[in-house]
Image (cartoon, helix red, strand yellow):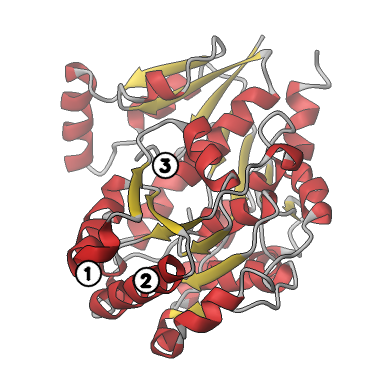
Amino acid sequence: MKKVMVYAYTGLNLGDDLFLKILFERYPDTNFILFARDKYKKVFKQKNVKIFSSNNLFLRGTNYIMRRLNKNYIINKIISKTCDASVYIGGSIFQQSDNWRVDVVKRENLLNENQPFYVLGANFDPYSHDDYYLEYRKVISKYEDICFRDTYSYNLFGDLENVRIADDIVFSLGGDMVNTETYNNEKNIVISVIKPSYRSYLSGYDDLYYEKLKDISIEFIKKGYGITLMSFCKHEGDEEAIREILKIIPQKYIQYIKQYNYRGSIAESLDIISNSSLIIATRFHAMILGWVFNKPVVPIAYSEKMTNVMKDVEFNGLYTDFKNLYQLNPVDVGKSIRTNLIDVTKQKENSREQFTELDKLLMDSL
């Protein structure tokens, strides 16, 4: 059996965990190695997944020392050398931080000589320094394969022979999880919630955002709907944001509102989304999942990665971003339950091409 080192965001974020689930289930005859907290042993119980626990005292101590030396990639690299390939799977894995030069060096050091390195499902976030783009271009050119999920990112590097494009990986959810004929279509609105100020560029938007979601919730409750405020990631403040919204909901409406916190149960989370009437999506993958499950979706775009994909799928329904959030009318959102559907059949097929090159290594060799 082939053995693959996997790099991913492991902060119990529903979108990133879906990436991993799809990867692991696509290649049941491949052994995968993932560094993550102990909780991930419950999220992924497949026999072909080995979780190296970052809770382990030895690894925690070693990682602490290596972080102080800016070499916290060392343990991963040592183990990855025993593998046949490495895969970095994730969405916003190219973000320009204040320490982006350090990040570039870390990415460079994850590469092993004569071992293929694949990047799947990513987008390249808008950047403000040309050096950032040029330095990452050098690293990206060394990958065996990188498949972006949006046209904007692809156009930045499309002249490189190892760069491809396909729709977001979550569009490719398997038929066992996506059967639109079985949905109950309950009179329930799912609102995926974020804490805007978790992202520095959205600081100052918390109060406006919470007020808008309160007003939208009340609008639907008056129409006879229940509301589920849904957290995709506790670590990034989603649950804290929900608590703030609940504080400003008038008491007479509270009984119609439920809170759901994702803590690793992927199936349970998908069930909630698939049985809803409409998704109000601030999370990127709440938007994608709504489309996959053939639900009307009203995106509240917190970054250009959402609007870029909306352009790619030719979504023309009601949406807003945070700059224009003050203009969002709850009555218009209520009407969107009849107008914001789109057909993503093409995207479901195309998304499987994210794995085209990795298939050659892990399937063609069987």
Q: Residues within 10 Å of mark 3 (few under 14, many from 20)?
A: some
Q: Position of residue 16 (x, y in %)?
A: 49, 43
Secondary structure under tag 2 reads: helix
How far is the residue under mark 1 from the one under mark 3?
A: 37 Å
Q: Earlier in the sequence, mark 1 or mark 3?
A: 3
Q: Are marks 2 and 1 in contact (CB under 8 Å)?
A: yes
Which residue type carries mark 3? Tyr
Residue named by callout 2: 218
Q: Nearer the viewer, residue 205 or 109?
A: 205
Residue named by callout 1: 250
- For the point 60% across and 77% down, the residue is 335
- For the point 50% across and 43% down, the residue is 272
Residue named by callout 3: 9
- Return the mark for residue 292: none
Q: Nearer the viewer, residue 337 or 319?
A: 337
Q: Earlier in the sequence, mark 2 or mark 1?
A: 2
Q: Position of residue 352 (x, y in %)?
A: 77, 42
Mark 1 vs mark 3, foreground winner is: 1
How far is the residue under mark 2 from the one under mark 1?
A: 9 Å
